[in-house]
Image (cartoon, rainbow, N blue to C red):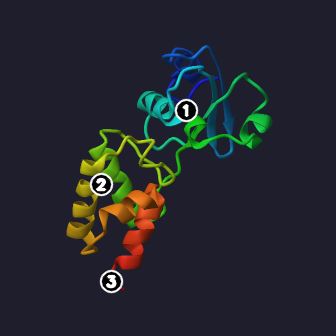
Amino acid sequence: MSAPSDGIDLAAEAAGLPGVTASSVETTPEGIVVQLVAPGTTPAIDYRHLLLATIGVGTPLTVLLVDELTNLSAALDAPRPAHRRSTYVAPGSDIEAFVCATVAEAVELKQVGVEDDLFDLAADSLVLIELTTAVTERYGVQLDVQDVFEAGTVGRIAALVTAGAPS
């Protein structure tokens, strides 16, 4: 199966990712779902970013790390720890878009989604400081670095900004 209409063979790209021994690519109404059998320790979010670099940011993409390829429904329904599943969720507000863009730039990725976890993105204390500074400059909201760390996901951080923003 090919990626969106630009002729990229996403199945071949997925199969060629480091550490991947088997892959499957399916298109659903919600976007592209990629199953990868990759016995190493690379988290799903890293594979998602590698694939997005190929197919372009903004593409709804879910990457599932599986022990063996299975039908799509079973793969999507199976409980999976966060490091074995990564779905891009686009920002739904200007604040979410700003936080996503700021985090993406700080961790040097092309795209970060609302449900992406700071830990999975390898965000360190310098990233958190950069983010809190950018939020203060843009929205006048002072966020505590510990609160940002505890929020965990980009979407929850955006919610902290929204809660602290003047009406």
Q: Quadrant of residue 3?
A: top right
Residue 4's tag is: 1
Q: Earlier in the sequence, mark 1 or mark 3?
A: 1
On the image, the x and y values in percent for residue 81 come to: 62, 41
Amino acid at pointer 2:
Leu
| Mark 1 neighbour class, 10 Å CA radius: few under 14, some 14 to 19, many 20 or more | some
Q: Is residue 167 left or right of residue 71?
A: left
| Mark 3 neighbour class, 10 Å CA radius: few under 14, some 14 to 19, many 20 or more | few
On the image, the x and y values in percent for residue 119 come to: 43, 45
Q: Quadrant of residue 129?
A: bottom left
Q: Secondary structure at mark 2?
A: helix
Q: Secondary structure at mark 3?
A: loop
Instruction: Give the residue pinned by disc 3.
Output: 166
Instruction: Give the residue pinned by disc 2.
Output: 128
Q: Earlier in the sequence, mark 1 or mark 2?
A: 1
Disc 1 to disc 2, how far (Cα)?
Answer: 34 Å
Residue depicted at x 49% and y 62%: 92
